[in-house]
Amino acid sequence: MSGRLIGVGVGPGDPGLLTLNAVAAIEAAPVVAYLSAEGAASLARTIVEAHLGPQHEERLLEAPMRADPEIVAAFYDAAAAGIAHDLEAGRDVALLCLGDPLLYGSFVYILDRLRDRFAFSVVPGIMSFGAAASRLGRVLARRRDSYTILSSLLPEQRLEALIEASDAVTILKVGKRLPRLKAILARQGLLETAVLVAWVGWPEERIVPLTDWPDDEEAPYFALVLAGPKP
Amino acid sequence: MSGRLIGVGVGPGDPGLLTLNAVAAIEAAPVVAYLSAEGAASLARTIVEAHLGPQHEERLLEAPMRADPEIVAAFYDAAAAGIAHDLEAGRDVALLCLGDPLLYGSFVYILDRLRDRFAFSVVPGIMSFGAAASRLGRVLARRRDSYTILSSLLPEQRLEALIEASDAVTILKVGKRLPRLKAILARQGLLETAVLVAWVGWPEERIVPLTDWPDDEEAPYFALVLAGPKP
Protein backbone atom coordinates (compact mmCIF):
# COMPACT_ATOMS: atom_id res chain seq x y z
CA MET A 1 0.00 0.00 0.00
CA SER A 2 1.33 3.42 -0.93
CA GLY A 3 2.18 6.11 1.58
CA ARG A 4 0.36 9.42 1.93
CA LEU A 5 1.68 12.83 0.94
CA ILE A 6 1.06 15.37 3.69
CA GLY A 7 1.60 19.03 2.92
CA VAL A 8 2.43 20.58 6.28
CA GLY A 9 2.19 24.35 6.68
CA VAL A 10 4.84 25.45 9.16
CA GLY A 11 3.97 29.15 9.29
CA PRO A 12 6.26 32.02 8.36
CA GLY A 13 9.04 31.73 10.93
CA ASP A 14 8.24 31.56 14.66
CA PRO A 15 8.27 27.85 15.64
CA GLY A 16 5.51 28.71 18.12
CA LEU A 17 3.18 29.29 15.18
CA LEU A 18 3.23 25.59 14.31
CA THR A 19 -0.17 24.05 14.89
CA LEU A 20 -0.68 20.98 17.04
CA ASN A 21 -1.70 19.10 13.88
CA ALA A 22 1.52 20.15 12.14
CA VAL A 23 3.64 18.90 15.03
CA ALA A 24 1.70 15.62 15.14
CA ALA A 25 2.02 15.12 11.37
CA ILE A 26 5.77 15.73 11.47
CA GLU A 27 6.35 13.50 14.48
CA ALA A 28 4.38 10.64 12.91
CA ALA A 29 5.90 10.80 9.42
CA PRO A 30 8.79 8.47 8.64
CA VAL A 31 9.99 10.82 5.89
CA VAL A 32 10.22 14.61 6.20
CA ALA A 33 10.95 16.55 3.01
CA TYR A 34 11.64 20.25 2.58
CA LEU A 35 12.91 22.70 0.04
CA SER A 36 15.85 25.01 0.32
CA ALA A 37 17.27 27.61 -1.98
CA GLU A 38 20.37 26.17 -3.67
CA GLY A 39 23.23 26.09 -1.21
CA ALA A 40 21.22 27.62 1.67
CA ALA A 41 19.74 26.06 4.80
CA SER A 42 16.06 25.09 4.53
CA LEU A 43 13.95 27.71 6.32
CA ALA A 44 11.09 25.24 6.77
CA ARG A 45 13.44 22.72 8.40
CA THR A 46 14.79 25.38 10.76
CA ILE A 47 11.25 26.12 11.95
CA VAL A 48 10.47 22.47 12.81
CA GLU A 49 13.94 21.47 13.99
CA ALA A 50 12.87 20.80 17.59
CA HIS A 51 10.41 18.17 16.34
CA LEU A 52 12.83 16.19 14.18
CA GLY A 53 14.61 13.14 15.53
CA PRO A 54 16.70 10.14 14.54
CA GLN A 55 13.51 8.29 13.54
CA HIS A 56 13.05 10.63 10.58
CA GLU A 57 14.48 10.16 7.15
CA GLU A 58 15.03 13.63 5.76
CA ARG A 59 14.86 14.63 2.10
CA LEU A 60 16.35 17.95 1.06
CA LEU A 61 14.94 19.30 -2.20
CA GLU A 62 17.39 21.94 -3.36
CA ALA A 63 15.62 24.41 -5.62
CA PRO A 64 17.56 26.13 -8.40
CA MET A 65 18.20 29.86 -8.03
CA ARG A 66 17.42 30.49 -11.71
CA ALA A 67 13.81 31.36 -12.56
CA ASP A 68 14.04 29.84 -16.09
CA PRO A 69 10.67 27.98 -16.38
CA GLU A 70 12.21 24.84 -17.88
CA ILE A 71 14.75 24.57 -15.09
CA VAL A 72 12.06 25.12 -12.48
CA ALA A 73 9.78 22.49 -14.09
CA ALA A 74 12.65 20.00 -14.22
CA PHE A 75 13.33 20.62 -10.54
CA TYR A 76 9.71 19.94 -9.57
CA ASP A 77 9.62 16.85 -11.80
CA ALA A 78 12.66 15.45 -10.04
CA ALA A 79 11.43 16.44 -6.57
CA ALA A 80 8.03 14.81 -7.21
CA ALA A 81 9.73 11.67 -8.53
CA GLY A 82 11.81 11.43 -5.37
CA ILE A 83 8.75 11.80 -3.17
CA ALA A 84 6.85 9.29 -5.32
CA HIS A 85 9.65 6.80 -4.68
CA ASP A 86 9.07 7.04 -0.91
CA LEU A 87 5.28 6.92 -1.31
CA GLU A 88 5.47 3.84 -3.54
CA ALA A 89 7.56 2.13 -0.87
CA GLY A 90 4.69 2.70 1.56
CA ARG A 91 6.28 5.57 3.48
CA ASP A 92 4.21 8.65 4.36
CA VAL A 93 6.00 11.86 3.43
CA ALA A 94 5.49 15.12 5.36
CA LEU A 95 6.43 17.88 2.93
CA LEU A 96 7.10 21.06 4.91
CA CYS A 97 5.88 24.35 3.48
CA LEU A 98 6.54 27.89 4.70
CA GLY A 99 3.31 29.65 5.61
CA ASP A 100 0.31 27.78 4.23
CA PRO A 101 0.83 25.03 1.63
CA LEU A 102 -1.94 26.25 -0.69
CA LEU A 103 -1.23 29.99 -0.73
CA TYR A 104 1.71 30.69 -3.06
CA GLY A 105 3.37 27.51 -1.78
CA SER A 106 5.80 25.34 -3.71
CA PHE A 107 3.76 22.42 -2.34
CA VAL A 108 1.21 23.15 -5.07
CA TYR A 109 3.67 22.24 -7.82
CA ILE A 110 4.50 18.93 -6.15
CA LEU A 111 0.80 18.24 -5.55
CA ASP A 112 0.05 18.95 -9.24
CA ARG A 113 2.37 16.12 -10.15
CA LEU A 114 1.21 13.59 -7.53
CA ARG A 115 -2.44 14.22 -6.69
CA ASP A 116 -3.82 11.71 -9.18
CA ARG A 117 -1.49 8.94 -8.04
CA PHE A 118 -1.38 9.12 -4.26
CA ALA A 119 -3.55 9.87 -1.25
CA PHE A 120 -2.74 13.27 0.18
CA SER A 121 -3.78 15.64 2.92
CA VAL A 122 -2.92 19.20 3.88
CA VAL A 123 -2.31 20.79 7.27
CA PRO A 124 -2.98 24.52 6.96
CA GLY A 125 -0.38 26.93 8.30
CA ILE A 126 -0.32 30.47 9.65
CA MET A 127 0.04 32.83 6.70
CA SER A 128 2.77 35.47 6.77
CA PHE A 129 0.38 38.40 6.47
CA GLY A 130 -1.60 37.22 9.49
CA ALA A 131 1.59 36.87 11.52
CA ALA A 132 2.73 40.31 10.38
CA ALA A 133 -0.57 41.94 11.33
CA SER A 134 -0.43 40.28 14.74
CA ARG A 135 3.04 41.73 15.45
CA LEU A 136 1.57 45.19 14.80
CA GLY A 137 -1.93 44.74 16.21
CA ARG A 138 -3.03 46.02 12.81
CA VAL A 139 -6.62 45.26 11.87
CA LEU A 140 -6.92 43.32 8.60
CA ALA A 141 -10.67 43.47 8.02
CA ARG A 142 -13.80 44.57 9.80
CA ARG A 143 -17.39 43.54 9.13
CA ARG A 144 -17.96 44.87 5.61
CA ASP A 145 -14.37 45.05 4.38
CA SER A 146 -12.61 43.17 1.66
CA TYR A 147 -9.02 42.02 1.98
CA THR A 148 -6.77 41.14 -0.94
CA ILE A 149 -3.52 39.19 -0.93
CA LEU A 150 -1.22 40.06 -3.80
CA SER A 151 2.15 39.02 -5.09
CA SER A 152 4.47 41.75 -6.27
CA LEU A 153 5.00 39.53 -9.34
CA LEU A 154 1.60 40.62 -10.69
CA PRO A 155 1.75 42.93 -13.72
CA GLU A 156 1.88 46.58 -12.61
CA GLN A 157 -1.53 47.64 -13.95
CA ARG A 158 -3.24 44.67 -12.41
CA LEU A 159 -1.50 45.23 -9.09
CA GLU A 160 -2.68 48.84 -9.06
CA ALA A 161 -6.26 47.96 -10.05
CA LEU A 162 -6.53 45.40 -7.25
CA ILE A 163 -5.00 47.74 -4.68
CA GLU A 164 -7.52 50.37 -5.72
CA ALA A 165 -10.47 47.94 -5.60
CA SER A 166 -9.94 46.37 -2.18
CA ASP A 167 -10.29 48.00 1.22
CA ALA A 168 -6.92 46.76 2.38
CA VAL A 169 -4.16 44.58 0.94
CA THR A 170 -0.99 42.68 1.63
CA ILE A 171 1.64 42.56 -1.08
CA LEU A 172 3.92 39.54 -0.63
CA LYS A 173 7.46 38.83 -1.83
CA VAL A 174 8.35 42.45 -2.27
CA GLY A 175 12.09 42.16 -2.91
CA LYS A 176 13.48 44.30 -5.66
CA ARG A 177 10.03 45.46 -6.77
CA LEU A 178 9.69 47.78 -3.78
CA PRO A 179 10.28 51.08 -5.66
CA ARG A 180 7.53 50.22 -8.17
CA LEU A 181 5.21 49.27 -5.32
CA LYS A 182 5.89 52.50 -3.42
CA ALA A 183 4.93 54.50 -6.51
CA ILE A 184 1.62 52.64 -6.79
CA LEU A 185 0.82 53.07 -3.10
CA ALA A 186 1.66 56.79 -3.31
CA ARG A 187 -0.76 57.20 -6.23
CA GLN A 188 -3.44 55.38 -4.23
CA GLY A 189 -2.95 57.51 -1.12
CA LEU A 190 -1.78 54.50 0.87
CA LEU A 191 1.97 55.12 1.17
CA GLU A 192 1.95 57.05 4.45
CA THR A 193 0.19 54.32 6.43
CA ALA A 194 1.81 51.30 4.80
CA VAL A 195 4.18 49.12 6.83
CA LEU A 196 6.97 46.86 5.63
CA VAL A 197 7.46 43.61 7.53
CA ALA A 198 10.50 41.53 6.65
CA TRP A 199 11.34 38.08 7.98
CA VAL A 200 8.41 37.98 10.39
CA GLY A 201 9.21 35.76 13.37
CA TRP A 202 12.90 35.33 12.50
CA PRO A 203 15.82 36.91 14.38
CA GLU A 204 16.27 39.20 11.33
CA GLU A 205 12.71 40.52 11.62
CA ARG A 206 12.26 44.16 10.67
CA ILE A 207 9.04 46.14 10.95
CA VAL A 208 9.17 49.73 9.67
CA PRO A 209 6.82 52.32 8.23
CA LEU A 210 7.26 51.93 4.48
CA THR A 211 8.34 55.56 4.11
CA ASP A 212 11.28 54.83 6.46
CA TRP A 213 12.70 52.03 4.31
CA PRO A 214 15.88 53.42 2.68
CA ASP A 215 15.44 54.04 -1.05
CA ASP A 216 18.87 52.61 -1.80
CA GLU A 217 18.28 49.34 0.09
CA GLU A 218 16.73 46.37 -1.68
CA ALA A 219 13.94 44.77 0.36
CA PRO A 220 14.30 41.09 1.19
CA TYR A 221 12.37 38.57 -0.86
CA PHE A 222 10.58 37.60 2.37
CA ALA A 223 9.29 41.09 2.96
CA LEU A 224 5.63 42.01 2.73
CA VAL A 225 3.79 45.30 2.80
CA LEU A 226 0.51 45.84 4.66
CA ALA A 227 -1.45 48.71 3.13
CA GLY A 228 -4.85 50.25 3.68
CA PRO A 229 -7.60 50.75 4.45
CA LYS A 230 -7.63 54.36 3.29
CA PRO A 231 -7.88 56.71 6.30
CA MET B 1 1.09 47.07 37.21
CA SER B 2 -1.72 46.39 34.75
CA GLY B 3 -2.21 43.07 33.04
CA ARG B 4 -1.84 42.45 29.32
CA LEU B 5 -4.65 41.82 26.86
CA ILE B 6 -3.81 38.88 24.59
CA GLY B 7 -5.98 38.26 21.54
CA VAL B 8 -5.64 34.53 20.91
CA GLY B 9 -6.68 33.14 17.54
CA VAL B 10 -8.04 29.64 18.06
CA GLY B 11 -8.68 28.76 14.42
CA PRO B 12 -12.04 27.86 12.90
CA GLY B 13 -12.93 24.65 14.70
CA ASP B 14 -10.47 21.74 14.83
CA PRO B 15 -8.64 21.96 18.20
CA GLY B 16 -5.59 20.57 16.39
CA LEU B 17 -5.33 23.86 14.49
CA LEU B 18 -4.39 25.71 17.67
CA THR B 19 -0.82 26.94 17.48
CA LEU B 20 1.76 26.16 20.14
CA ASN B 21 1.77 29.88 21.01
CA ALA B 22 -2.00 29.88 21.44
CA VAL B 23 -1.85 26.91 23.81
CA ALA B 24 0.98 28.53 25.79
CA ALA B 25 -0.86 31.86 26.01
CA ILE B 26 -4.04 30.18 27.24
CA GLU B 27 -2.24 27.98 29.76
CA ALA B 28 -0.34 30.96 31.19
CA ALA B 29 -3.26 33.39 31.43
CA PRO B 30 -5.05 33.69 34.77
CA VAL B 31 -8.18 34.94 33.00
CA VAL B 32 -9.63 33.45 29.81
CA ALA B 33 -12.45 35.40 28.15
CA TYR B 34 -14.61 34.41 25.20
CA LEU B 35 -17.74 35.43 23.39
CA SER B 36 -20.83 33.39 22.79
CA ALA B 37 -24.01 34.10 20.95
CA GLU B 38 -26.75 34.84 23.49
CA GLY B 39 -27.84 31.62 25.15
CA ALA B 40 -25.46 29.40 23.15
CA ALA B 41 -22.21 27.69 24.13
CA SER B 42 -19.04 29.59 23.21
CA LEU B 43 -17.50 28.04 20.09
CA ALA B 44 -14.07 29.45 20.96
CA ARG B 45 -14.22 27.89 24.44
CA THR B 46 -15.19 24.53 22.96
CA ILE B 47 -12.09 24.60 20.76
CA VAL B 48 -9.69 25.21 23.66
CA GLU B 49 -11.54 23.18 26.30
CA ALA B 50 -8.72 20.63 26.73
CA HIS B 51 -6.36 23.44 27.74
CA LEU B 52 -8.58 25.00 30.41
CA GLY B 53 -8.20 24.06 34.05
CA PRO B 54 -9.20 25.03 37.58
CA GLN B 55 -6.43 27.66 37.61
CA HIS B 56 -8.35 29.73 35.06
CA GLU B 57 -10.93 32.34 35.82
CA GLU B 58 -13.33 32.32 32.90
CA ARG B 59 -15.29 35.28 31.59
CA LEU B 60 -18.21 34.66 29.28
CA LEU B 61 -19.14 37.64 27.11
CA GLU B 62 -22.62 36.94 25.85
CA ALA B 63 -23.21 38.85 22.62
CA PRO B 64 -26.71 40.05 21.75
CA MET B 65 -28.43 38.39 18.81
CA ARG B 66 -29.79 41.70 17.53
CA ALA B 67 -27.65 43.56 14.99
CA ASP B 68 -28.91 47.03 16.10
CA PRO B 69 -25.67 49.11 16.12
CA GLU B 70 -26.43 50.76 19.46
CA ILE B 71 -27.04 47.44 21.18
CA VAL B 72 -23.86 46.01 19.66
CA ALA B 73 -21.82 49.05 20.75
CA ALA B 74 -23.23 48.83 24.27
CA PHE B 75 -22.28 45.15 24.39
CA TYR B 76 -18.68 45.88 23.38
CA ASP B 77 -18.48 48.79 25.84
CA ALA B 78 -19.55 46.52 28.67
CA ALA B 79 -17.31 43.65 27.54
CA ALA B 80 -14.30 45.98 27.32
CA ALA B 81 -15.08 47.41 30.75
CA GLY B 82 -15.17 43.93 32.24
CA ILE B 83 -11.83 43.04 30.70
CA ALA B 84 -10.37 46.40 31.79
CA HIS B 85 -11.38 45.54 35.35
CA ASP B 86 -9.22 42.38 35.23
CA LEU B 87 -6.35 44.19 33.52
CA GLU B 88 -6.39 46.99 36.10
CA ALA B 89 -6.16 44.37 38.83
CA GLY B 90 -2.93 43.15 37.21
CA ARG B 91 -4.38 40.01 35.61
CA ASP B 92 -3.47 39.10 32.05
CA VAL B 93 -6.54 38.29 29.97
CA ALA B 94 -6.45 35.83 27.05
CA LEU B 95 -9.39 36.77 24.85
CA LEU B 96 -10.21 33.83 22.57
CA CYS B 97 -11.13 34.57 18.96
CA LEU B 98 -12.42 32.20 16.30
CA GLY B 99 -10.10 32.10 13.31
CA ASP B 100 -7.64 34.99 13.40
CA PRO B 101 -8.25 37.88 15.82
CA LEU B 102 -7.58 40.61 13.24
CA LEU B 103 -9.59 39.26 10.29
CA TYR B 104 -13.29 39.98 10.83
CA GLY B 105 -12.80 39.18 14.52
CA SER B 106 -14.84 40.60 17.38
CA PHE B 107 -11.47 41.04 19.11
CA VAL B 108 -11.00 44.17 17.01
CA TYR B 109 -13.90 45.94 18.71
CA ILE B 110 -12.53 45.15 22.15
CA LEU B 111 -9.04 46.23 21.07
CA ASP B 112 -10.44 49.52 19.74
CA ARG B 113 -11.66 50.28 23.24
CA LEU B 114 -8.54 49.19 25.17
CA ARG B 115 -5.47 49.65 22.97
CA ASP B 116 -4.61 53.10 24.29
CA ARG B 117 -4.89 52.06 27.93
CA PHE B 118 -3.26 48.64 28.19
CA ALA B 119 -0.39 46.60 26.79
CA PHE B 120 -1.63 44.03 24.32
CA SER B 121 -0.42 41.30 22.01
CA VAL B 122 -1.99 39.08 19.38
CA VAL B 123 -1.48 35.39 18.60
CA PRO B 124 -2.50 34.80 14.99
CA GLY B 125 -4.84 31.93 14.22
CA ILE B 126 -5.60 29.67 11.28
CA MET B 127 -8.16 31.41 9.10
CA SER B 128 -11.30 29.55 8.08
CA PHE B 129 -10.65 29.84 4.34
CA GLY B 130 -7.20 28.29 4.74
CA ALA B 131 -8.64 25.40 6.75
CA ALA B 132 -11.41 24.96 4.16
CA ALA B 133 -8.93 24.88 1.27
CA SER B 134 -6.81 22.33 3.11
CA ARG B 135 -9.79 19.97 3.53
CA LEU B 136 -10.24 20.05 -0.24
CA GLY B 137 -6.62 20.27 -1.39
CA ARG B 138 -7.83 23.28 -3.34
CA VAL B 139 -5.11 25.68 -4.44
CA LEU B 140 -5.68 29.24 -3.19
CA ALA B 141 -3.02 31.11 -5.16
CA ARG B 142 -0.10 30.40 -7.43
CA ARG B 143 2.84 32.66 -8.28
CA ARG B 144 1.11 35.57 -10.03
CA ASP B 145 -2.39 35.23 -8.64
CA SER B 146 -4.36 37.53 -6.40
CA TYR B 147 -6.63 36.23 -3.66
CA THR B 148 -9.47 38.20 -2.11
CA ILE B 149 -11.32 37.56 1.13
CA LEU B 150 -14.84 38.95 1.18
CA SER B 151 -17.73 39.12 3.54
CA SER B 152 -21.19 38.46 2.14
CA LEU B 153 -22.21 41.62 4.03
CA LEU B 154 -20.54 43.76 1.34
CA PRO B 155 -22.95 45.67 -0.90
CA GLU B 156 -23.90 43.56 -3.93
CA GLN B 157 -22.23 45.71 -6.60
CA ARG B 158 -19.01 45.89 -4.65
CA LEU B 159 -19.06 42.15 -4.01
CA GLU B 160 -19.47 41.49 -7.73
CA ALA B 161 -16.73 43.97 -8.73
CA LEU B 162 -14.24 42.38 -6.34
CA ILE B 163 -15.14 38.84 -7.43
CA GLU B 164 -14.61 39.93 -11.02
CA ALA B 165 -11.29 41.66 -10.28
CA SER B 166 -9.51 38.93 -8.33
CA ASP B 167 -8.24 35.59 -9.60
CA ALA B 168 -9.91 33.68 -6.80
CA VAL B 169 -11.96 34.55 -3.73
CA THR B 170 -13.45 33.32 -0.50
CA ILE B 171 -16.78 34.73 0.60
CA LEU B 172 -17.25 34.39 4.35
CA LYS B 173 -20.37 34.31 6.53
CA VAL B 174 -22.65 33.29 3.72
CA GLY B 175 -25.81 32.52 5.70
CA LYS B 176 -29.04 33.76 4.21
CA ARG B 177 -27.25 35.70 1.47
CA LEU B 178 -26.43 32.51 -0.46
CA PRO B 179 -29.04 32.96 -3.24
CA ARG B 180 -27.71 36.45 -4.02
CA LEU B 181 -24.16 35.11 -4.02
CA LYS B 182 -25.02 32.22 -6.34
CA ALA B 183 -26.46 34.69 -8.84
CA ILE B 184 -23.26 36.75 -8.79
CA LEU B 185 -21.04 33.69 -9.21
CA ALA B 186 -23.21 32.45 -12.09
CA ARG B 187 -22.81 35.80 -13.88
CA GLN B 188 -19.05 35.59 -13.35
CA GLY B 189 -18.79 32.04 -14.70
CA LEU B 190 -17.64 30.76 -11.31
CA LEU B 191 -20.70 28.89 -10.06
CA GLU B 192 -19.88 25.45 -11.47
CA THR B 193 -16.52 25.20 -9.70
CA ALA B 194 -17.43 26.91 -6.43
CA VAL B 195 -17.55 24.90 -3.22
CA LEU B 196 -19.48 25.57 -0.03
CA VAL B 197 -17.76 24.68 3.23
CA ALA B 198 -19.80 24.94 6.41
CA TRP B 199 -18.54 24.47 9.95
CA VAL B 200 -15.04 23.49 8.88
CA GLY B 201 -13.44 21.24 11.49
CA TRP B 202 -16.63 20.73 13.53
CA PRO B 203 -18.67 17.52 13.70
CA GLU B 204 -21.36 19.31 11.60
CA GLU B 205 -18.84 20.04 8.80
CA ARG B 206 -20.32 19.96 5.29
CA ILE B 207 -18.37 20.33 2.08
CA VAL B 208 -20.43 20.34 -1.13
CA PRO B 209 -20.22 21.72 -4.65
CA LEU B 210 -22.19 24.95 -4.45
CA THR B 211 -24.58 23.79 -7.16
CA ASP B 212 -25.54 20.85 -4.90
CA TRP B 213 -26.65 23.04 -2.00
CA PRO B 214 -30.46 22.86 -1.88
CA ASP B 215 -32.10 26.10 -2.98
CA ASP B 216 -34.64 25.88 -0.18
CA GLU B 217 -32.05 25.42 2.59
CA GLU B 218 -30.53 28.44 4.29
CA ALA B 219 -26.74 28.18 4.58
CA PRO B 220 -25.24 28.40 8.07
CA TYR B 221 -23.71 31.69 9.17
CA PHE B 222 -20.41 29.82 9.48
CA ALA B 223 -20.42 28.75 5.86
CA LEU B 224 -17.96 30.06 3.31
CA VAL B 225 -17.69 29.72 -0.44
CA LEU B 226 -14.41 29.15 -2.27
CA ALA B 227 -14.64 30.38 -5.87
CA GLY B 228 -12.26 30.73 -8.77
CA PRO B 229 -9.91 30.94 -10.43
CA LYS B 230 -11.78 30.87 -13.73
CA PRO B 231 -11.04 27.63 -15.59
Image (cartoon, coloured by chain):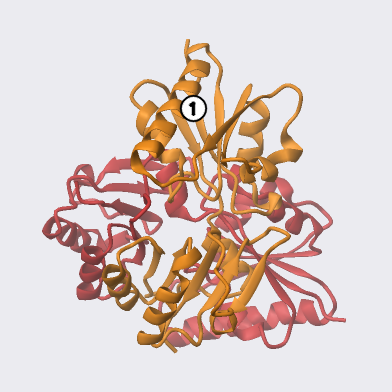
Chain colours: A red, B orange
Badge 1: how crowded within 10 Å, few (<14), some, or many (20+)? Answer: many
In this view, A106 is above or below B229: above
Q: Residue at x 35, y 86 (%)?
A: B187
Quarter containing the C terminus of chain B: bottom left
Provide residue B59's location: percent of width, then percent of height: 60, 27
Provide residue B41's location: percent of width, then percent of height: 66, 42
Q: Residue at x 37, y 75 (%)?
A: B144
User: Where does label 1 land, which residue?
Assistant: B5
> Please, what secondary structure does the residue beneath circle 1 have?
strand
Q: Is residue A66 visible?
A: no
Is B163 displayed left or right of A96 in the figure? left
**Closer to the camera in the image, A88 or A39:** A88
Q: Which chain is home to disc 1?
A: B
Provide residue A98's location: percent of width, then percent of height: 54, 59
Is A36 displayed left or right of A183 in the figure? right
Count every numbered label the image shows and give the total: 1
**Closer to the camera in the image, B20 or B175:** B175
* Location of residue B14 (image quadrant): bottom right
Q: Residue furthest left?
A: A187
**Closer to the camera in the image, B31 or B40:** B40
Is A86 displayed left or right of A182 in the figure? right
Provide residue B12's location: percent of width, then percent of height: 59, 54
In this view, B1 is above or below B15: above
Q: Residue at x 47, y 72 (%)?
A: B178
| Type of amino acid at the residue the image marks with label 1 | Leu
Q: Is residue A19 visible?
A: yes
Is A89 displayed left or right of A142 in the figure? right
**Closer to the camera in the image, A178 or A148:** A148
